[in-house]
Amino acid sequence: MYILYIYNIFKDDKGKGKEVIVNILISNSSKEPVYEQVKNQIKQSILKGELKKDDPLPSMRRLAKELHISVITTKRAYEELEREGFITSFVGKGSFVAAQNIGPIQEKRRSVIERRLSDIAEESKNLGISLEELKKMLDMLYEEDEK
Amino acid sequence: MENAVTLNNVKKSFKDFQLDNISFSVKKGFITGFIGPNGSGKTTTIKLMMNLISQDSGSLTMFGRDHAEHAKHLKQRIGFVYAENHFYEHLTVRQMKRVIASFYREWDEELFVKYMDYFALPWKKKIKHLSTGMKMKFSLACALSHHPDLIIMDEPTSGLDPVFRRELLTILTEVIQDENKTIFFSTHITSDLEQIADYITFIHNGKIILNDTKEALNDQYHIVRGANERMDEDARHMFIYARETSVGFEGLTNQPEKIRRKMGQHTVLEPASLEDIMVYTTRSERYA
């Protein structure tokens, strides 16, 4: 079974406030649990800067309805996002994007990439793959992704 | 968390079947799916909740009140949708509505008209001439039109096409946007619950086997597949049910971490669907 839901307008429940476009795609055939899919996609939007500090998130019940998933699932996603410091929730008011200290997070992610690249560089040297060839491979992978 | 309904050691015996001291609760503000094979006691449990039959022993409270003592008051707060037709066949939709509306103090005619339009139901048709789907829609319109706090449905999706089943699920998620509303519905079509249910109660042979959030079940219950060499006496104890064939085994477990540690890389673990859980659990009971 493969069902895809796209939910793309974040705004507060009263319809006021600014609208932020965020896509959440749920795949029922993915091995990743649904709550994690929701959590990770909201996290990505925050890290990419699509969702900014104080942007309101839809209520758990509303998001559950729009995505056709259970309230407990959205609750779990929100709770974990809160625990990780990405959002803050206020009783009766809802959940909002928290102030992010994105610098260190991005730096950490960069260092992960650097580490992986150094592995790849070493492995390539062992196999006799030239830098030129490696760059070409990377070019192709980047283009593939954009399609 | 508040309970809309609580059953405590409820027992009900019939000649050939009994509800065996069942205890569980329905959480307020959520959708609870009530699953189990045919003849497992779903309808009996619902009849008890509706006070259509009374238990031999044990207690049943609804919104914190004893449900038999306050039956009259509580019925006003319940919207009931029944799979089989419980209307007068010879009446028209409009006449039947008048009968039903007269029972409820909170009947909202405007809301009912809205649902009639939304479901495209004919006012003048006789009940007996309605299709299965239309009867179901009419039943749902009646149940929702007196602003119930608790909606109890017995097999509402059986006999419905997938299009309307999906529509029904959307209506239910709409209803619980109000966190004071509670939905309890029985079904053997578990895929309906896979998406929207918050809690799952699983009954089999008159006993409650499971009563938990769907999230917890998803974490815990896994289907494991692997080569027969991996299976031994030790491992068998970690399975609720396992089927061994000449090309490998397949089983249901609620100890995925242990299995992962013991069997390691050469087995495949996947989250079990509600159907897997229902089928394998009932099988293990049959052959135990």
Image (cartoon, rainbow, N blue to C red):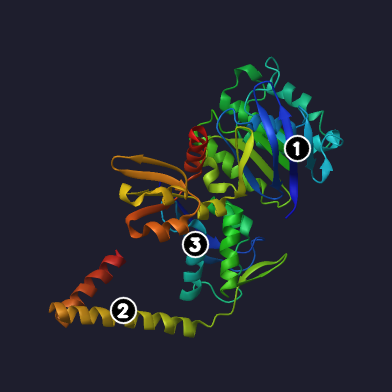
Look at the image and tell me in which quarter the N terminus of chain B lies.
bottom right
Disc 1 crowd, CA 10 A, few/some/many (<14, 14-19, 20+): many
The image shows residue A106, relative to residue B174, as above or below, that is: below
Give x and y (percent) for residue B123.
Answer: 67, 25
Compare residues B51 and A9 and report the one nearer the observer.
B51
Numbered disc 3: what chain? A
Q: Are marks 1 and 2 in contact (CB under 8 Å)?
A: no
Drawn side of residue B55 relative to residue A121, left or right: right
Residue B23 image label: none
Tags 1 and 2 both on a single chain: no
Q: Residue furthest front?
A: B233
Q: Is residue A65 visible?
A: yes
Drawn side of residue B128 relative to residue A30, left or right: right
The type of residue carrying mark 2 is Arg
The image shows residue B3, relative to residue A138, as above or below, that is: above
Q: Say which element carries label 3.
A: helix
Residue at 71% x, 52% y: name it.
B179
Residue carrying label 2:
A116
Residue carrying label 3:
A36
Q: Is residue A49 visible?
A: no
Compare residues A71 and A120 and report the one nearer the observer.
A120
Q: Residue furthest left?
A: A128
The type of residue carrying mark 3 is Glu
Numbered disc 2: what chain? A
Residue carrying label 1:
B78
The type of residue carrying mark 1 is Ile
Residue at 70% x, 45% y: name it.
B26
